[in-house]
Structures are given as structure tokens and as C-alpha cells.
Image: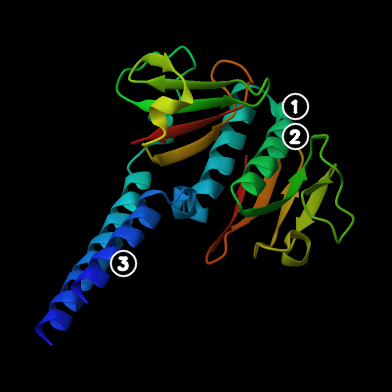
Amino acid sequence: MVELAFSITILTFFFLYTYYYSKYDNYNIYTFDPNNLIYLNSSCNNNLYIYKIINLTNNDITICYFGKHVNSTYIQNYKPVFEYLYAGQNYFDPYILIIFK
Amino acid sequence: MLLATIIIIIILSFITYYNPSPIDNINPNLIGKNFEDQIIYIYKNFGYIYISNYTLHFQNYTKYISYNFSFICISSYNLSIQECTGNNTNCCYYFNGYFIVNKSILKYCNENFILYNPPDWVCFCYNVSSSNSYYVNFFCI
């Protein structure tokens, strides 16, 4: 009986943790302002973020890891927390920006 | 019993950790605002001729991330988006002079007013939906 109660307690805590953790993920998405992220580009000019840029004109994919060009293996353990389809910066050149955390 | 609990937690942890679909968390509201803000940005910075191209990219993008997206537009410019015939969506009503906007035309948005030309107008009523929520909005540039 004690074992059953202990198991139920552990499972309850686990589900509560998972629930709040996923809520936290949701919260993160709304903390990004798209206007502040329009300056991130495929030359990895920003060393504060891990991000991926998918250029829709030529389908080029660029991954920037705190200011460095890297391949996709660097980000496989990070989760996307923000996504946006920008029309372009100085001229029409649509791209998708994905920020990872 | 305790061992079973630990095994269940380990299995659930793996499922949670490797769940590759965090995109499900994006509220349709944010997707809709993305469309709206960028259409306005294009019009102000690049010109209306690029709007059609962006709407095509946006349709493909929303389909790729498993959202339903469709729009009806009203424009005094020819945007090169197919013209609405009554039943279709992702189309535009083009007009000269004036245009009476009402709910039956817009499908998703509950709006009633008259647009005059000039000034020139581009208006969109759009609908974004996922499996459990949706967002509808109307805006004019």
C-alpha cells in the first residue's frame, strides 16, 4: 500500500512537472518581438541566439550558433521557441527565421 | 510497483524529450499577426507587387507546419492573386470606384462598410486554424 501511494505521488509530480514545463515553452514563444529579430541574417551577425534561416528564394538553409556558422548536428538538442516568415530586410527576399533554445 | 513507476517515467521522459513538434505550441493568433504585419511591411517598404508572392509562400509555410490558412482580399490594385468567383478562397475582389464590403463576401469576417477609390485600398480577411484553436482578423492597408 505504501509503495502504491509512493508511486502515485511520483507519477503526479512527474505529470505536474511536464505540464508546467510545456506551459513555460508556450510562454517563451510570446516573449520574442519579431521587430527586434528582423536584423538576424544569414551572415550570423548576432552572437546572442541560436537560429536557423531558411531562404525561400533559393531554399538555402543557414544555421547560426551564437555567431558561428554550423551544421545541423549542433542544434539537434535544442528546441525551436520562435518562428516567423519575414518578407525580407532591405528588399523582398522572404525567409523563415527559427530561434532555438 | 516502484520499478514499474520508474520505467513508466523513463519512457514518458524520452517521449517528452524527443517530441519533435514544439511548433504545435504556436497560437494561431501569432501566425495571423505574422501574415498581417508582413503584408503591411511589404506594402510600405517594397510595394504591392510583392504581396502575391508573399501570400503564396505563407500558404505553403502554414501547410508545412500543419495549420489551415486562407484569406479573401479586396484591392483597388491588381495584385496578381486569382479573382474571387464566390466559392473560392485565397482570392481577391478587384474594384474601381467603390466596393460594398459585407459579411457574405468575406466568409470569415463580420464587416460591413463601403471602400472608395481613391485612396487606394488593399484589405484582407484571413483565417488561421489548428486542430484546437483558430484566429480570424480583418485589416486594410
Q: Identify residue for label 3.
A: B8
- Where does the N terminus of chain B fall, quadrant-wise? bottom left
| Vertical side of B87 occupied by B99: above or below | above
Kind of residue at badge 2: Ser
Q: Quadrant of residue A14?
A: bottom left
Q: CA distance from mark 2 to mark 1?
A: 7 Å
Q: Identify residue for label 1.
A: B49
Kind of residue at badge 1: Ile
The image position of residue B78, as x and y in percent, is 83, 35
Kindly report which numbered mark, 3 or 2, lies closer to the viewer in this rendering: 3
User: Which residue is painted at 80% across and 51% down in the image?
Assistant: B99
Question: Which residue is situated farthest in the bottom direction here?
Answer: A1
* Label 3 Cα crowd, 10 Å radius (few <14 / some 14-19 / many 20+): few
Q: CA distance from mark 3 to mark 1?
A: 56 Å
Mark 1: which secondary structure?
helix
The image position of residue A29, as x and y in percent, is 38, 45
Kindly report which numbered mark, 2 or 1, lies closer to the viewer in this rendering: 2
| Vertical side of A94 occupied by B55: above or below | below
Can I make out residue A2 in this image? yes
Question: Which residue is situated farthest in the left direction here?
Answer: A2
> B97 or B139, which lies in front?
B139
Q: Quadrant of residue B86?
A: bottom right
User: Which residue is painted at 68% across and 20% down in the image?
Assistant: A58
Q: Earlier in the sequence, mark 3 or mark 2?
A: 3
- State yes or no: discs 2 and 1 in contact (Cβ < 8 Å): yes
| Vertical side of A99 occupied by A88: above or below | above
